[in-house]
Image (cartoon, grey):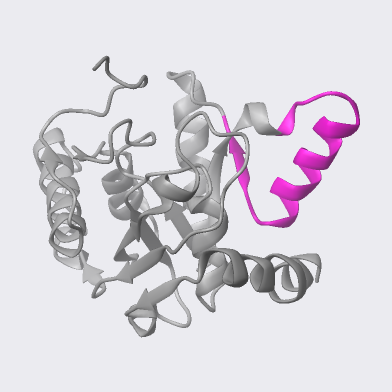
Amino acid sequence: MFYWLLKHLVAGPVARRLFRPQVEGAENIPDKGAVILASNHLSVIDSFLLPIVIKRRVNFLAKSEYFTGKGIKGAMVRWFFTTTGMLPIDRSGGKASEASLRTGLELLEREGCLGIYPEGTRSPDARLYRGRTGIARMVLEAETNVVVVPVVMVDTEKVMPIGAKRPKAGKIGVKVGKPMDFSRYRGMQPGRFVLRSVTDEIMSEIAALSDQDYADIYAPKKRPAA
């Protein structure tokens, strides 16, 4: 209920007024069934803008630090992230990464819609980077058939660059590609070559939708020096 109110009566109208989103291909997102929206990642507001412009409820995996803030501000941030469907994950690696994978799989097995950034982090320079194979593991290990829909956010880094404390008004776009079916891999051992093949196929579709330059390396955590 809170999600619907926030999306349709609060955040949605404000976002459309401020950012005038142009959406292409929203009809490509299935109305039901397990779906992963595989998106590029240019700005922290990607996770808020994408759910606003599509019909389905989208859950994103968000770093657990967002849910552990103290005081009134921490409580407000925690409430907002929970209400908007964010799922806390620990990105420290090892067993924590496995737990994060399980969190995503549980949502998919309930035939939910999961948002994932295959690059693993925001692009520091608006280029598209190599995808990490966690998305392929979810597709192949889910007990139900999972459809992957490639998504491209356009110009969100201009309305809220890395380091900005608040967004500014501007025009953004969202491009949604055709659903991708990986059922041909079901029953196969998800070895590293299969995982890389699935991930690269997804990134290829994202690149085809996007005007970004592609860098065939993993995205650095920090903005590179000029």
Q: Is residue 59 left or right of residue 74?
A: left
One can see residue 225 in this view? yes
Q: Is residue 205 left or right of residue 51?
A: left
Name the one closer to the observer, 59 or 111.
Answer: 59
Q: Considering the image in quadrants, where does the N terminus appear?
A: bottom right
Give above or below for 10 relative to 127. Answer: below
Within the magenta stretch, is there residue 223?
A: no
Name the one closer to the observer, 43 or 103.
Answer: 43
Residue 63 lies in quadrant: top right
Outermost right residue: 72
Q: Considering the image in quadrants, where does the C terminus appear?
A: top left
Magenta extent: 67-89
| Residue 212 percent coordinates (x, y) | 18, 49
Name the one closer to the observer, 74 or 100.
Answer: 74
| Residue 221 percent coordinates (x, y) | 36, 21
Q: Main secondary structure of the magenta part?
A: helix
Within the magenta stretch, is there residue 78?
A: yes
| Residue 39 percent coordinates (x, y) | 34, 54
